[in-house]
Image (tube, helix red, strand yellow):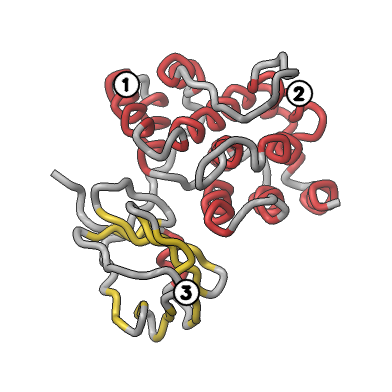
Amino acid sequence: MRPPPDVGCAVKDAVATDGQGEVIAVFSRASYIAIGGNVFALLSTSESSGPLHARFRDPPRVRLGDRAAVLGGCLYIGGVLVDLPARFWEPAPLASGAPIARMLGAVLMHEPVLDLGSGADNSIQTSLERAMDRGGLGEACRWVFGRGAGLTPSGDDVAAGLLMADALLGLSDEAVRLAIVAVAPTHAISRAFLTWAARGQSIEPLHRLLAACAREDLDAARSARTELAAIGHTSGLDLAYGALVGFRRAPDEAAAARPALRMTSRALAQITA
């Protein structure tokens, strides 16, 4: 049985203020709308919930370039009112201090394909850890942005996982993560997913996987992993891989992370330089 229709935070934000926009992409499983700096997707309840998702039992038919508008909290596309679901989706908080990395690594068993070239002799995790040693989260994200294939490149998915792990662990200030996303060399759809990952939100199966690992529920973790594997070519698993690296890194970063919250201006200057 399909879960009920719902909308995520990006959709809620998009309809909170009057604005104009358009349909920027139409795919077989989702259509993307940009209005007033917000990007969100219309899709079926056969797809997962997420911060960018407005899920319908029967999604409205739209065409690339259709004009979109928000007036008085109502969404219109091509001049037609879109009756958005009333149900609101938001991920449940993750238990603090939960030992996630060990089980996540055992269940995931995946490494992204990032087109590193024939000369690459290090694992992706090793390269990411070295990037973090050189320049922290921003350097690690810059190393993967744009690499690999997909609507959201595999590297962007890995970066989203890194950003979300950092957000859930509270290692950096949100402004630092959003500054990293702001300079990412990517397109509007991927940037929207990255933005919400930087705020601690991603697609529902990833949150379910992390929660299952936190409570050491192997069956639930395997079920969530299977659902992630069906998302995109490898997008769901690439997201989880980035989160795994982020959670594995947490013990090394935790002691130094708290002062970083008081150095936001300096960190922003380093990221945007």
Residue visible at 69% across and 28% down in the picture: 253
Residue at numbered disc 3 = 22
| Amino acid bearing label 2 | Arg
Residue visible at 32% across and 18% down in the picture: 218
| Amino acid bearing label 3 | Glu
* Residue placed most toward the observer, 128 or 119: 119
**Do tag 2 and tag 3 residues touch (Cβ < 8 Å)?**
no
Answer above or below: position of 230 versus 188.
Answer: above
Q: CA distance from mark 1 to mark 3?
A: 43 Å
* Residue placed most toward the observer, 114 or 242: 114
Residue visible at 50% across and 35% down in the picture: 239
Residue visible at 47% across and 74% down in the picture: 22
Q: CA distance from mark 2 to mark 3?
A: 41 Å
| Residue reaching furthest to the left | 1
The reply, left or right, for residue 185 in relation to residue 148 is right
* Residue 1: % across, % down: 13, 44
The reply, left or right, for residue 126 in relation to residue 161 is right
Q: Tag 1's secondary structure?
A: loop
Residue at numbered disc 1 = 217
Between discs 2 and 1, the one toward the N terminus: 2
| Amino acid bearing label 1 | Asp
* Residue 98: % across, % down: 47, 26
Residue at numbered disc 2 = 130
